[in-house]
């Protein structure tokens, strides 16, 4: 994977999926970091991805492992709702 542009990076509250642990799991982006990783961007996610070793105790994963599937937003009443991406 090549380094991604800032505009292509995920944001806090984006909902992503990954198959890093061997099965597809869903997570929420809580922070973004520029790194020396292959893509140049890593994210803190909750819940942490299982089976990912020491670096994932905080839930950090490279952009290349993640696919955005939606976003958490507030609705008109102030409740948090999942808004799926349109494919």
Image (cartoon, rainbow, N blue to C red):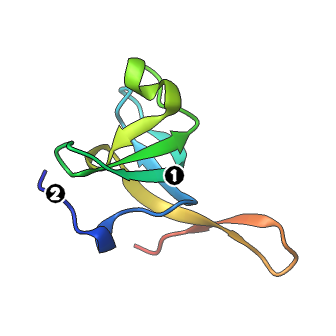
Residue of label 1 = 29
Give the mark nearest the N terminus, 2 or 1.
2
Tell which of 3 and 25 is nearer to you: 3
Residue at x 54% of width, y 60% of height: 12
Quadrant of image for the C terminus: bottom left
- x then y, percent, for residue 65: 30, 43
Residue sitting at 50 percent across and 24 percent down?
57
Q: x%, y% of residue 44?
A: 48, 43
Question: Dot 1: within a 10 Å radius of its alpha carbon, few (fewer than 14), some, or many (20 or more) residues?
Answer: many
Q: Which mark is residue 75?
A: none
Q: Residue furthest left?
A: 2
Q: Secondary structure at mark 2?
A: loop
Q: Is residue 46 left or right of residue 7?
A: right
Which residue: 13% across, 50% down? 1
Where on the picture, by quarter, is residue 6?
bottom left
Would residue 66 be visible to someone looking at this image? yes
The residue that mark 2 highlights is: 3
Relative to 21, residue 17 above or below? below
Looking at the picture, how far across and down is residue 68, in whole percent? 42, 59
How crowded is the residue under tag 2: few (<14 C-alpha within 10 Å), some, or many (20+)?
A: few
Q: Position of residue 50 (x, y in %)?
A: 47, 23
Q: Is residue 52 visible?
A: no
Q: What is the spatial separation of the Cα atoms under label 2 and label 1, in whole angstroms? A: 19 Å
Tell me if residue 37 comes above or below residue 13 in the rendering.
above
Q: How many marks?
A: 2
Position of residue 78 in the picture relative to residue 47 (left or right) = right
Quarter-wise, where is residue 4 in the image? bottom left
52 relative position to 57: left or right? left
Q: Secondary structure at mark 1?
A: strand
Residue 82 versus residue 62 in the image, above or below: below
Residue at the image point whose x is 37% and y is 39% from the top: 61
Closer-to-camera residue (9/49): 9
């Amino acid at each position: 994977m090549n380094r991604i542009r800032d505009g292509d990076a995920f944001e806090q509250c984006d909902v992503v999926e990954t198959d890093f642990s061997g099965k597809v799991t869903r997570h929420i982006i809580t922070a973004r970091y520029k790194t020396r990783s292959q893509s140049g961007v890593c994210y803190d996610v909750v819940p942490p991805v299982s089976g990912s070793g020491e670096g994932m105790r905080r839930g950090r994963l490279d952009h290349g492992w993640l696919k955005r599937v939606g976003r958490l937003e507030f609705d008109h009443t102030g409740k948090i709702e999942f808004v799926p991406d349109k494919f």
